[in-house]
Image (cartoon, helix red, strand yellow):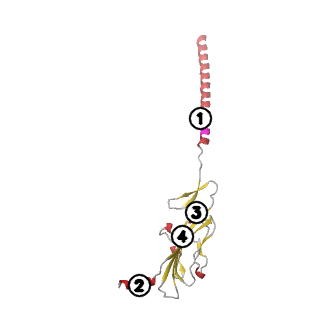
Amino acid sequence: MDALNFLLISSLVSASTSLQQDIEAKLGADVTLQCQISTDEVISVLKWSRADLNTDGYVYFYRNKRSYENYQHPSFHGRVKLKDPEMKDGDVSLILKNVTFNDTGMYECHIAVRNPVRSKRVHTEISHFINLTVTGETHGNMKLVKTGDGNIEEVVEVETRTDQMVVPAVSAAATVIVITAGFVAMWRLKRKKQQHMEADNQQLV
């Protein structure tokens, strides 16, 4: 009985296959994530995902002849579309618009297909992995930092120059000392004149 069940399961699902490629895209550009299967197979499920997004949502999700935006990760809303909405010739490539540094990562194109010539219950699962790297330059005194949620953002880099700060501080201190010494000298001179006047008055008396 166990052998019969094993043969039945093996006839329903065939072995999975996988491919991988590395691509680069310029910051702010549109990039096409290529993925294609043979034309004699019918696509029942298409899932574009990224492992580091965990369970927050898919990059793109398609099942039973329609896409589901409610399964999509918020950062990809309005930014992705199929290169060919009708998926002719098995082309399930995805266009990602206006890429940012946060789009860098490993993307998986996972497809569940069935061969119309054979039984409709026979399915094959195919995975195509694309490692996307977004390159570009930051603006002015901007630098890239990784936030607590794993995103990458541009922030203003403030450069601290201790040598430039010491000079004004020393100059200010010197100015205060000079002014204070001037007041002390004036006070002493005034005090000495007052003492002379008091001495002269005593002699007159």
**Number of other residues with Cα within 10 Å of mark 2, as a class: few under 14, some 14 to 19, many 20 or more:** few
**Which residue does the numbered mark 4 point to in the structure image?**
107
**Which residue does the numbered mark 3 point to in the structure image?**
101
Work out whether 152 lies above or below 166.
below
Work out whether residue 123 or residue 191 is closer to the camera in this orientation and state it. Answer: 123
The residue depicted at 60 percent of the width and 28 percent of the height is 181
Assign the N terminus to one quadrant of the image.
bottom left
Q: Earlier in the sequence, mark 1 or mark 4?
A: 4
Q: Which residues are magenta?
A: 166-171
Q: Earlier in the sequence, mark 4 or mark 2?
A: 2
Assign the C terminus to one quadrant of the image.
top right
Q: Is residue 3 left or right of residue 157?
A: left
- Amino acid type of the residue that numbered disc 1 sits on in the rendered structure: Ala
Q: Earlier in the sequence, mark 3 or mark 4?
A: 3
Mark 4 touches mark 2? (CB < 8 Å)? no
Q: Is residue 47 left or right of residue 32?
A: left
Q: Earlier in the sequence, mark 2 or mark 3?
A: 2
Nearest to viewer (mark 2 / mark 3): 2
Nearest to viewer (mark 4 / mark 2): 2
Q: Which mark is residue 173?
A: 1
Mark 3 touches mark 1? (CB < 8 Å)? no
Q: Earlier in the sequence, mark 2 or mark 1?
A: 2
Q: Quadrant of residue 102?
A: bottom right
- Report the number of discs: 4
- Amino acid type of the residue that numbered disc 4 sits on in the rendered structure: Tyr
Helix, strand or loop for disc 2: helix
Could you give the CA–CA distance between mark 2 and mark 1, rounded to whole angstroms? 91 Å
Mark 3 touches mark 4? (CB < 8 Å)? no
**Which residue does the numbered mark 2 point to in the structure image?**
7
The residue depicted at 58 percent of the width and 63 percent of the height is 101
Q: Does the image show residue 174? A: yes
Hey, which residue is sitting farthest left in the picture?
1
